[in-house]
Amino acid sequence: MLHEFFRWLQEDFGATEMAESWSQQFRGSLNLWGITEGTHVLTLMIFAGTIWLIDLRMLGLAFKGTPFSKLNEKVLPFTVFAFAVMIITGVILFLAKPMDYYHNVWFRAKMIFLLIAAANIFWFHRRVQKTEHEWDNSPNPPAMVKLSGAVSLTSWVIIIVFGRFIAYNWYDCGKPLPGFVNWFAECASYPGGIITAADQESDPLIYGAAGPALFSEPVQLAGGASGATSSTADHMTADTQNEGGR
Ligand code: HEM
């Protein structure tokens, strides 16, 4: 159901006989995509740079002589501002190719860790921060505080790495992929579909004998299935094909 909604958003919403969908126009715009992604990434520096200060203090690894509340008070406004901008720009970026991101392994994993990070923030405010007066000045906060700091630090690192990996097409649906990836990305409903071991055995030259690494170009497969689909191919520049990244 979500697949169909995102397909419509990507390919049909706003489209007329004369014009592409709004999503496709945004993706093809000269500067809009770049400015939005640039803002997403630049704000990331403020966001990660400030939240990690707080995390390291919670872990008792830095700023041990500064009360947690003082550091939090100074730094948090920057973190909250940057977080809001990241969420807004992230959602706008998503609108450029919602169906492709919906089936992207890294995007899905990033969203899962965003939920984990959000749950940790919620837990910190509801439980951990209630005892702040007990450990505010302590250079070595209690285990519960450290745990929350560790979950925060790790999940933001993972979110950033997965965010960067979205641009790479190593695990795009429509390639020979491990079963778990096909399941996790719901590749069965993506235009490229699933390539099975039997497909690979029947024609290793087309399907790649050893999996995704053999594909250097998107391939059009017999019977309508495609190695990297046209919708995947057309939103990626040549240098992102397999090499990945910009
Ligand atoms: C505050 C949390 C977030 C962090 C730390 C984060 C981090 C990142 C990073 C590091 C990149 C890679 C930029 C690059 O190309 O170098 C990225 C890209 C992206 N992010 Fe986020 N992001 C966050 C929130 C979101 C949200 C909420 C969404 C959407 C719902 C989102 C959607 C995207 C999209 C669509 C891309 C572009 C992927 C591509 O095609 O290259 N992000 N993000």
Image (cartoon, rainbow, N blue to C red):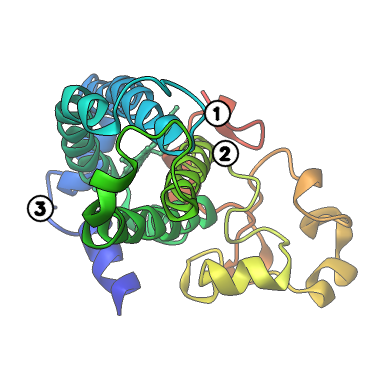
- Asked whether mark 1 and ligand 1 are closer than 8 Å, the reply comes as yes
* Residue holding disc 1: 245
Q: Quadrant of residue 193?
A: bottom right
Instruction: Name the kind of residue labelled 3 in the image.
Output: Gly
| Left or right side of 194 for 154 | left
- Asked whether mark 3 and ligand 1 are closer than 8 Å, the reply comes as no
| Left or right side of 3 for 190 | right
Vertical side of 98 occupied by 1: above or below = below
Mark number, residue 89: none
Q: Quadrant of the N terminus?
A: bottom left
Vertical side of 6 occupied by 138: above or below = above
Instruction: Name the kind of residue labelled 2 in the image.
Output: Tyr
**Residue 172 placed where, x, y %?**
58, 53
Mark 1: which secondary structure? loop
Q: Residue at image x 44%, y 55%?
A: 144
**Residue 64 placed where, x, y %?**
43, 24
* N-terminal label among 2 and 3: 3
* Residue holding disc 3: 14
Determine contact: label 1, label 3, CB under 8 Å.
Answer: no
Judge by depth and name the residue closer to the eye, 184 or 207: 184
Task: Give the mark toward the camera: 2 or 3.
Answer: 2
Determine contact: label 2, label 1, CB under 8 Å.
Answer: yes
Q: Distance between the residues labelled 2 and 1?
A: 5 Å
**How busy is the neighbourhood of tag 3: few (under 14 within 10 Å), some, or many (20 plus)?**
some
**Residue 157 placed where, x, y %?**
50, 38
Mark number, residue 168: 2
Q: Residue at image x 24%, y 36%?
A: 86
